[in-house]
Structures are given as structure tokens and as C-alpha cells.
Image: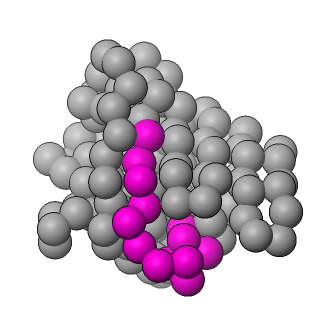
Amino acid sequence: MESTRLRVDRIDVWQTDNEHTLSLGVAGVHVMLIRLRYDGWVDEVINGTGAVAAGPGAWTLIGHELSLEFGPRAAATLGFPCDCRLHLDVDDDAVQHVRAALLEILDCACFVVDPAEGRVTS
């Protein structure tokens, strides 16, 4: 599947005793949940229909552009392209929440983050 660019206009982040979750949505409907389950320290992605697959192996957040790199099996399960690109149509504070959540949730994935304070890579 080729890369497409999804527009996200809502983010929510929550943490419980069992998980830490980032929700990305558009027009009031969640498109993607990125979750770390503390039982086993498993990161996973859940699409809008409830399909679950392994989290991305790498991600990049530059400005308001988020790129997630899924393996072929995860991409097929989720119905997303392997190179899944999202435009975060949210304010800068929300982007900072996304960055903080992804750094914690996808701790083992390779990443590039380019905030105003300077570029960070793993």
C-alpha cells in the first residue's frame, strides 16, 4: 500500500495502571490508538474498527507532521500504509503532548523528533 497522509484534528492522552494511550482522531472519530500495555511492555496500534497490531518500528515527528513506519503484517492488519503519514492539525501544545506520549509509549522504536528546542534522535 502506498503512503497516504491522514489529517488528525484531535488528540487525547491518558494513562492508567494498565496502559498509556495516545488517541488520534478526526471529526470526533478516533482513527488510531497507540498504546503501551504495561503487562508485558507491549506497544500496539488499534485502528478505528478495533483491529490490533504491533506498534511501528520507527517514527518521526517534525513540526506537525507525524510519520509511522509499520511492518507489512501490521500495516495489512490495520489497513494503513507501511509509511503512514499524519498531519496534526492541532495547536503546538497538543503536538508537545503527542511528542511526550510517543517518547514514552514507543520507547523501543527508532525515532526523530524535531521540536523548536532542537532535533532529537534515537
In this rendering, does residue 23 appear at all?
A: no
Horizontal side, residue 80 vs residue 17: left or right? left
Q: Residue at x 31, y 46 (%)?
A: 6
In the rendered image, the vertical position of residue 119 relative to residue 81, given as above or below: below
- The location of residue 44, given as percent across then percent down, is 45, 46
Location of the N terminus by quadrant is top left
Which residue is at a point 63% across and 36% down the rendered structure image?
58
Tell me the quarter of the picture where residue 76 sits.
top left
Q: Is residue 9 magenta?
A: no
Choose between 39 and 22: the one closer to the eye: 22
Image: 59 above or below 62: above
Q: How many numbered tags mark residues here?
A: 0
- 45 shown above or below 76: below
Rendered location of residue 51, percent (x, y)? 23, 41
Q: Give the quarter of the figure containing the C terminus.
A: top right
Closer-to-camera residue (57/114)? 114
Magenta stretch, residue numbers = 85-98
The residue sitting at 41% across, 73% down in the picture is 90
Residue at position x 53%, y 32% in the image: 69
Above or below: residue 81 compared with residue 103: above
Which scheme is used to colour this image of the protein? Answer: one colour
Measured from the top left, where is residue 4 in percent x and y? 33, 32
Q: In this orientation, does residue 113 appear?
A: yes
Quadrant of the rendered structure where residue 80 is? top left
